Image (cartoon, grey):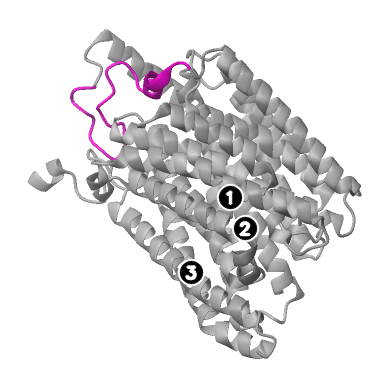
Amino acid sequence: MTPTIAILLIITFVLSTVGLLVLIWSIANNQFSHGQEAARSIFSPGEEGHSEDPARPADPSFTGDNTAQAAAINARWTADQSSRTAVLTWLTSSVFWLVLGSFFGLASSIKMHLPEFLAASEFLTFGRIRPAHLNAVTYGWASMAGIGAALFLIPRLFKTSLAGGKYAVSGAVIWNIGLILGLTAIIIGLSDGKEWLEFPWQIDILFVVGGALCAIPLLLTAANRQVEHLYVSSWYLMAALVWFPILFLIANLPFTFPGASGATVNWWFAHNVLGLWVTPIGIGIAYYMIPKILGRPIISYQLSLIGFWSLALFYSQVGIHHIIGGPIPTWLVTLSIVHSVMMSIPVITVAINHHGTMMGNFGRLKDSPTLRFVWIGALMYTVASLQGSMEALRSVNVITHFTHYTIAHAHLGMYAFLSFILFGAIYFIMPRLTDWEWPWRGLISLHFWLVSVGIVIYVVSLSIAGWKQGVALLDAAMPFMDIVRMTMPALQARTVGGALMTLGHLVFAFHFVAMLMRRGIGNQQPTLFRPAIKEITQ
């Protein structure tokens, strides 16, 4: 057993032990004993049955006509405003990095079928702009938007004001400095050379500090919470904000994991960033947004807790299946495959809750921008996760490994799942913090259709071409250049899909800035996909 594998197993054991202790604490404090009643803890008195979607008129039966409702509405407004500066700082930064990362991604996609594109500049070679794209959208867009959404939801979940918001703002500043320095380093050729870990380790320290500063408001607000039970979204968000600094710090320890053993740590980290960082954020947001917009609790609260703890127990070793056939012990790969297949448990439990809660309410997708983005994102989580469990099987992996199929799968998870949920969350959050409606309904619709059509073209084309590519690579008689030519139409389609998504991001960013500047007409009606009934009758 190499020192690297020993260290990983020790870390996994420690994390599992800590998780077990937290599980014991939660049982001892009756976190499991509340039953379905706990699913109603996110609703204020009298609110259940009434939508809190900002893209709908105020429900006349829940406007604070009695003392309890008035107090609940005032407390919620106070909680929202307490996080305003911190949330807007993180969200605004995330939108900027989304746009920049999109251009990096589009340029690298074009280079896949037009290699002479921007070939005159050493700073814009594929080997530099592709990792710049990955890091900009992962640590810039996804991470910063996720933290912003978490900072907004935490006061609501704990029913108290956000404490220590200045630490979160300072964390955002340091995080942005880290991104600027890290992306600049990659562009000029200074990289650690490991996927998802390209930033030089000296710069990684800034992300650790920035992330730690964001944990301070979480701890302070948790200490001041006004609720006895912690709703399941709290578990997901708190776990993500605790897991990520540990994962990031360990994976970036300098001079610790050299040579081939570094690949084990590389993919241990890369997949855990997906499963123990962005996935809990996305699921936690969906567990809050879907019930609140529908005005009904999730259908099985006990199942939601099973989903959380099974994610915590099974995900830590999933990433090793990316190096099947690599220079690591076969038993470690087998362990990873088992963990990957067992991940079907949390995926199915989450799917039952998210999609079961939607039953009978799919008509709301025609109206609510937040619900449409969030639910489609939740649906893509189900698809991408089950697909990932299948890809871990050796019989499937032998075909999909090192092909465009894996790229399609990654975008199905990071984009169709997470980014869609983050888009929906931002459409929900911004009216609450700016006291202004989204100015133009048409831009929301345009954004939705551009990114939806774009990701469909992207995933479908690369999935089909990637599978054919994998089969062809197993044929020793097939010339490699023939395989390259076979995938060329799919790579061109990938650029078309990427261009549509980039255009959608520009529309979204323009609308976001207009929202911040309170442009457009101050709508008396909510910004729906379709005009509100009152508007139609006027």
Q: Mark 3 or mark 1: which is in front?
A: 1
Q: Are marks 2 and 1 in contact (CB under 8 Å)?
A: yes
- Mark 1: amino acid: Val
Q: Nearer the viewer, residue 80 or 387?
A: 387
Q: Which mark is residue 341?
A: 1
Mark closest to the chain's N terminus, 2 or 1: 1
The structure residue drawn at horizontal position 47% and vertical position 59%, both measured from the top left corner, is 505
**The image quarter in which residue 323 lies:** bottom right
Establish if 410 lies above or below 113.
above
Name the chief secondary structure element in magenta. Answer: loop
Q: Is residue 366 above or below residue 168?
A: below
| Residue 519, placed above or below residue 391 | above
Residue that numbered label 3 is attached to: 458
Depth check, front residue: 229 or 468: 468
Q: Quadrant of residue 41?
A: top left
Q: Earlier in the sequence, mark 3 or mark 1?
A: 1
> Residue 500's x, y, as percent?
44, 68
Residue shown at the point (28%, 48%) measured from the top left = 365
Task: Give the magenta part as a residue range.
Answer: 33-62
- Mark 3, Cα crowd under 10 Å, few <14 / some 14-19 / many 20+, is many
| Residue of label 2 | 392
Q: Residue furthest left?
A: 537
Between circles 2 and 3, the one closer to the viewer is: 2
The amino acid beneath tag 3 is Tyr
Please tell me whether mark 3 sits on a helix, a strand or a loop.
helix
Q: Amino acid at mark 2?
A: Ala
Distance from label 3 to label 1 (Cα)? 26 Å
